[in-house]
Amino acid sequence: MVAFGKKLRQNQIEEWQRYYINYKLLKKKVNRYSQQIQVGADNQQNVLKDFSIMLDNQIEKIVMFMLEQKGLLASRLSILGEQHDALVEQSDGSKISELREAYRAVGQDLLRLLFFVEINAIGLRKILKKFDKRFGYRFTDYYVKTRANHPYSQLRQVFKHVGVGAVVGAISRNLADLQDQEGNYISIYDQPALSHPDPVIDSIKAAVNRLSNSTNFLEFLGKHAFIFQDESPTPSEDHLAEQRYHFMSLLLNLVNTFLYMVNTYIIVPTADNYSLHLGAAATVCGVIIGSMAVAQVFSSVYFSAWSNRSYLRPLVFSSIVLLVGNTLYALAYDLNSIPVLLIGRLFCGLGSARAVNRRYISDCVPLKMRLKASAGFVSASALGMACGPALACLFQTNFKIYKLTFNQDTLPGWVMALSWLVYLLWLWVSFREPPRENNKLFPQESYTGLPVQDAVKIDFTQPLLLNSEAKLQDNNDDQEFDDGEEDSDENHKPVTSMVSAYRLLTPSVKVQLFIYFMLKYAMEILVAESSVVTGHYFIWSTTSVAFFLAFLGLTVLPVNVIVGNYISNMFEERQVLLASEIMVLIGIILSFQVLIPYTVPQYVSAALITFVSAEVLEGVNLSLLSRVMSSRLSRGTYNGGLLSTEAGTLARVIADGTITLSGYLGENRLLNVTLVPSLFICLSSIIATCFTYNSLY
């Protein structure tokens, strides 16, 4: 009987094999087209027509097979439904358990079908990119537009998953009913919160979400955090995350994120007054604010490396360093010392543990909760960004205790030092160090995220797209394109140096990192010089500046709600990306003071356009980066999150340095002089985006 089952499974494997996209055939066809065009045996128009027909046939074959398999699943569910109805009046525990396992088996087969679709989608994307690269023609743009918008589109059937929701609903409802042993059969449609989640349902939902073009607010915020989500998490990995997960530890990481963002922005409204009191120019505020970012360039690397071994120790070290840094920042007033002030801010930058916070969410939060945790990370950052300036406006007092002065300049340092002391005590008492991974405890994993023995059963390691024999038979002239694209154990190992990480960056990824640099530069110029600019042109008080910056920070979450729930469902992310860049450019242009007197409405409206557009741009840009960046950059010390953090931090350092240097030309020229680099960088990013537009998916 076992031998018969194996033979049946093998027959099923061979049947499924026939319906995978024939990647090797299409690749050879592309090579042949290239040779024919070079010798003049064919023209480009005929090549496009012939290749389009071949792709149409391949996709139609996939779609017909999908419909057939969905019909089989529906038939099995119909039979199981009849059995379920017969058991309603009975209480046979063994039969209920068997029926529950039968429903799970249908779910597993649906999951296999979704993996089948995903692998074919990857193959289709690769062959389209290969065609574009070989011929220098935007065939992908043409093919997707003409096929996806047609009423009889086969391509759309692959990505819309018609009927999958009905199958998932039937499995979920029946599993929930069978799980209830008390006879209180409440429908999941009436009480969704009472439904009983099942691992196979979670896996199916994750697979569908990966293939879906639509998004929501939570998903958008999760991508905004740039915390990599494993496309196909292995059972052992998710089990390890379940063991590691500790709610209080996660909460402490989010509080660390919040406090650090408060620490960053709480001094912005008063930094110019502080520098004036210590005998420096108001524009030295750029150095005071930027010194924290300078230190963060280095701290991001060692904290990322430290998180490979521990999470508690780097967080404790971060809290101690920030406690010392804020104390020095506050003491600089009575010591009348700019060097002490700058050293204090450098210490604060050396305590930046955001790399640890990201890593903890990525490694220690189960897949089903990771998206919410990622959204929490972004929300904590946004809230901290708004609360920092808001707290600064509450410190309008001046008194002394012994020889220590407490006023609007020093209170941010004292309050943050006390906050980090309380946090340190809470951390020491409540944080639980998660167990480290022991590779010997878990079986070897395959590309699909299933144990190898299971992957062989469903043969996801065998398709032509991933077949090692096919790779060995590839022509030498294809190796340049395929290197780094074919999945292998070597290609999934984390990189070991920043140079290796840089070599994995494609032109489109480099452009997106440059866009991230641009938006962080524009935002830092706007925020860091706000107190000087508003003081010079409008004679704003510290309270007015603090309220203005708090208002800007509070726009982050509402804007993400609109983009996540509406805009990203109406337009492609690359369209939103380019539109946001143009809006940032418009905001920068409107910020210039030319000919006519500078007014509050002009400044506020231009600042809102720039800041809000940059926030939208950041979320969309990081969302695209998380999809196109190499999988080798999803883990290890030199990961994608570190690269984006370094790009953003470097932008802040240069922006703050620009403000300080421009101050030597006088406060009346500060605004326009600092906006010129922003304008040039923004124009450059728009041009670069236009050149790589078709590779942004």
Image: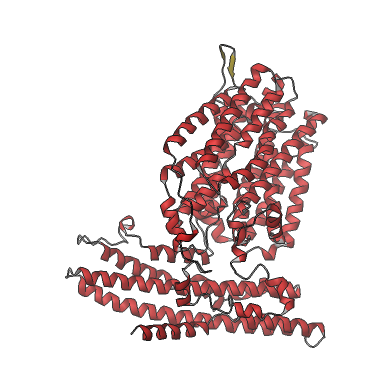
Q: Nearer the viewer, residue 554 or 54?
A: 54
Residue at 61%, 51% in the rendered image = 637
Count of marks overlaid on the render: 0
Residue that appears at 29% across and 76% down: 80
**Residue 62 is at least partly visible in this image:** yes
Q: Quadrant of residue 538?
A: top right
Where 337 falls versus 139 (above or below)? Answer: above
Residue 145 in sight? no
Nearer to me, 296 or 625:
296
Place of residue 494 in the rendered image (x, y in percent of width and height, measured from the top left): 61, 58
Q: Is residue 349 above or below residue 688?
A: above
User: What's the residue at 37%, 86% (across, down)?
Assistant: 4
Task: Say which of 1 and 246 sits in front.
Answer: 1
Q: Which quarter of the rendering shows the C terminus?
A: bottom right
- Residue 545 in the image, given as x and y percentages of width and height: 62, 30
Question: Residue 465: percent from the left, percent from the top?
Answer: 59, 76
Scheme by which the image is coloured:
secondary structure
Which corner quadrant of the image does residue 103 belong to? Answer: bottom left
**Could you say where residue 476 lies in the image, as x and y percent from the top left?**
73, 78
Q: Given the current orientation, which residue lies at the most extreme bottom position?
A: 41
Left or right: 512, with 436 as reference point: right
Residue that sits furthest to the front in the current view: 440
Image quadrant containing the N terminus: bottom left
